[in-house]
Image (tube, rainbow, N blue to C red):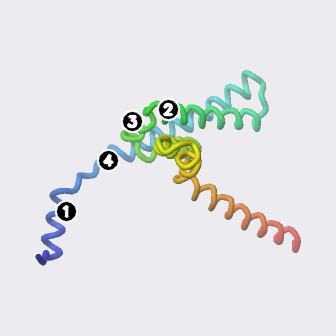
């Protein structure tokens, strides 16, 4: 059966879900901004009221965001939030934690070694790989830049 491009496009337009970008984009921006604002507020509280150093406060808040994201993923709340907030939940640190935990949850029926152990970094693995490779290239370039400067 030969289908013309026009007929195919018409069939696709009839069956494809309609994009709600007018709603999804601002919602993603607001949710992502809210996650970041919570992190910044936590850093501010720790530095101003608890007299913790900036670096230490940032580390503790990062750990807290990862932990909360992991727990919310385990309870199924992160997926519900992601369904409505879309890319706003991919704020790097919380999205990374969600990717690792969701891969582990998906592979848990296959056992600790061949399931979770091999598939936990399915989503996060490329981020780790290319992040490490990029930092090595940057480090080498920086070394030579300062050497000949």
> Residue 11 in the image: x percent, y percent?
15, 63
Q: Residues within 10 Å of mark 3 (few under 14, many from 20)?
A: few
Q: Earlier in the sequence, mark 3 or mark 2?
A: 2
Secondary structure at numbered mark 1:
helix
The N terminus: image quadrant: bottom left
Q: Quadrant of residue 58?
A: top right
What numbered label is drawn on residue 34? none
Number of other residues with Cα within 10 Å of mark 2, as a class: few under 14, some 14 to 19, many 20 or more: some
Residue at the spot x=60%, y=37% of the render?
66
Residue at mark 1: 12
Local SS, label 4: helix
- Is residue 137 placed above or below 93 in the rendered structure? below
- Quadrant in which residue 129 is drawn: bottom right
Mark 2 and mark 3 in contact (Cβ < 8 Å)? no
Residue underneath mark 4: 22
Question: Which SS class for mark 3?
Answer: helix
Task: Tell me the distance, in whole angstroms, between the alpha carbons under discs 1 and 3.
Answer: 28 Å
Which residue is the site of mark 3?
Answer: 80
**Residue 34 rendering spot, x and y as whole percentages:** 51, 35
Single out the mark in the foreground, 1 or 4.
1
Q: Earlier in the sequence, mark 3 or mark 4?
A: 4
- State how far apart marks 3 and 4 are (Cα): 20 Å
Which residue sits at x=55%, y=49%? Answer: 114
Mark 2 or mark 1, earlier in chain: 1
Chain-order first, disc 1 or disc 3: 1
């Amino acid at each position: 059966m030969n289908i013309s491009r026009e007929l195919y496009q018409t069939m696709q337009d009839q069956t494809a879900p309609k994009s709600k970008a007018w709603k999804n984009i601002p919602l993603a921006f607001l949710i992502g901004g809210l996650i970041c604002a919570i992190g910044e507020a936590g850093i501010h509280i720790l530095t101003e009221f608890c007299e913790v150093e900036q670096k230490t406060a940032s580390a503790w808040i990062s750990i807290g965001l990862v932990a909360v994201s992991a727990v919310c993923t385990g309870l199924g709340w992160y997926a519900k939030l992601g369904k409505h907030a879309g890319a706003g939940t991919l704020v790097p640190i919380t999205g990374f934690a969600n990717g690792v935990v969701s891969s582990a949850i998906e592979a848990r029926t296959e056992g600790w070694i061949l399931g979770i152990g091999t598939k936990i970094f399915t989503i996060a693995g490329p981020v780790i790989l290319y992040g490490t490779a990029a930092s090595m290239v940057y480090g080498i370039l920086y070394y030579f830049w300062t050497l000949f400067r």
